Amino acid sequence: MPAEEKAPTRLDEVMPQWHFRKRRHQVRVDGSGEAVLRAVIQVTWSEVPLFSSLLRVASFGRVRRDPDRSVLDEFLSSGFVVLSRTDRELVMGAVSGSEPFPGDQGGDARLDWFLAYAEPQSTKVAFSFRYADGVLSTETRVFGADEPARRQFRRYWTLIRLPAGLVRREILHAVRRRIES
């Protein structure tokens, strides 16, 4: 196991237990941690055409993305929140159901709420982008609060697992192209 995988990550703290995991995808990138994470945040839909196309197909053409909008901005507007950000790692999360993050909680209060949340039939999703030793990686973890939640998510996971991996690789390569240009 590479040294970078042995060190605990913020994702390990945010989602120490999970039922589903999309393994780490990674790409070599030359740059500072802050520059690489800034590029992650700035990647637009026009830089990830496969992702955009898959979403359009899945919505039967009803959903179209602004090609100049940041992909992560789209995640933020759809219920995901930043749970942790350092100069080398960004962790975002969401909870199934209605508005999961009450009020304007921020920082530690938001993270504490996320860690404690376990309503019946709910799922929590956390994903990260991490830059260490010249490698940018991404990983997703999902926790189902109970067996009905895990059963429901398992069906969804079966459908999206392969396309999600392709999308994650596409985002990583878009970040590398941004840094290299």
Image (cartoon, helix red, strand yellow):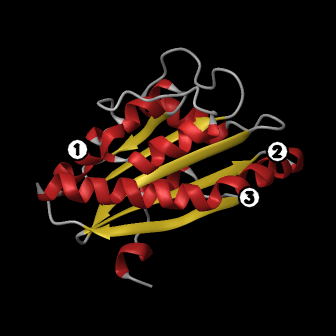
Query: As drawn, is 30 to the left or to the right of 22?
Result: left
Residue furthest right in the image: 148
Which residue bears the numbered disc 1? Answer: 38
The secondary element bearing badge 1 is classed as helix
Horizontal and vertical percent position of residue 121: 83, 38
Of 124 and 137, nearer the camera is 137
- Vertical arrangement, residue 24 with respect to residue 126, above or below: below
**Tags 1 and 2 in contact by the CB under 8 Å rule?**
no
- Label 1 neighbourhood size at 10 Å, few (<14), some (14-19), many (20+)? some
At label 2, which amino acid type do we have? Answer: Ala
- Vertical arrangement, residue 8 with respect to residue 60, above or below: below
Query: As drawn, is 141 to the left or to the right of 51?
Result: right
Which residue bears the numbered disc 2? Answer: 149
- Vertical arrangement, residue 82 with respect to residue 100, above or below: below
At label 3, which amino acid type do we have? Answer: Thr
Query: As drawn, is 142 to the left or to the right of 49?
Result: right
Query: Closer to us: mark 3 or mark 1?
Result: 3
At label 1, which amino acid type do we have? Answer: Arg
Q: Marks 3 and 1, Cα distance to the nearest angstrom?
A: 32 Å
Of 77 and 2, nearer the camera is 77
Point 33% across, 32% down: residue: 67
* Residue 83 visible, this angle: yes
Which residue bears the numbered disc 3? Answer: 158
Point 11% across, 54% down: residue: 181
